[in-house]
Amino acid sequence: MPILSSFYGIIIKMFFIQADHNPPHVHAIYGEYLGAIDIRTGNLIDGDLPKKAQALVKEWVNIHRDELLHIWDTQNFNKIPPLK
């Protein structure tokens, strides 16, 4: 699972096999926590992340939604800038 970005101790990854992994989402890893975040809504759809980490990931997803959907659709891996 390629790493797209990392910031504030959060690592963002994406699987590149679409058929079994809808809706489009990223995986956020924060210490022992792991959550799947819907790219279209920025909401946690699976797993568990602390509220602060969820808010940071949601903000990052909202900023980079178009890039993330493009990566999901094309499966062309690109690094995405971290949240600052």
Image (tube, helix red, strand yellow):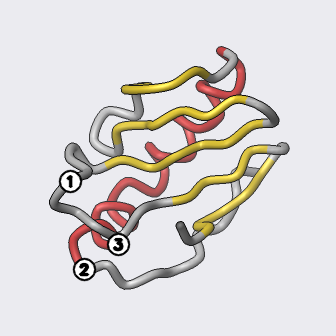
66 vs 75, nearest the viewer? 75
Name the quadrant containing residue 66.
bottom left
Amino acid type, callout 2: Thr
Q: Distance between the residues labelled 2 and 1?
A: 16 Å
Observer-side mark, 2 or 1, equals 1
Q: How crowded is mark 1: few (under 14 residues within 10 Å), some or many (20 or more)?
A: few
Amino acid type, callout 3: Ile
Q: Residues within 10 Å of mark 2 (few under 14, many from 20)?
A: few
| Count of marks overlaid on the render | 3
Q: Which residue is drawn at 83% across and 44% down?
A: 8
Q: Label 2 belongs to which residue?
A: 74
Q: Give the number of the disc on residue 69.
A: none
Q: Would you say the residues marked 2 and 3 are in contact, meaning their CB atoms lie under 8 Å apart? A: yes
Residue furthest to the top: 51
Whichever of labels 2 and 1 marks the residue nearer the N terminus, that label is: 1
84 vs 79, nearest the viewer? 79
Tag 1, which secondary structure?
loop
Tag 3, which secondary structure?
helix
Q: Viewed as shown, does residue 19 lie left or right of 78?
A: left
Amino acid type, callout 1: Asp
Q: Label 1 belongs to which residue?
A: 20
Residue furthest to the left: 19
Q: Viewed as shown, does residue 62 lie left or right of 81?
A: left
Q: Residue at x 29, y 71 (%)?
A: 70
Q: Which residue is drawn at 71% across and 20% down?
A: 52
Q: Label 3 belongs to which residue?
A: 71
Q: Would you say the residues marked 3 and 1 are in contact, meaning their CB atoms lie under 8 Å apart? A: no
Q: Viewed as shown, does residue 8 lie left or right of 1?
A: right
Tag 2, which secondary structure?
helix
Q: Is residue 29 above or below residue 49?
A: below
Name the quadrant containing residue 15.
bottom left
Residue 13 spot, x, y in % from top left: 56, 58
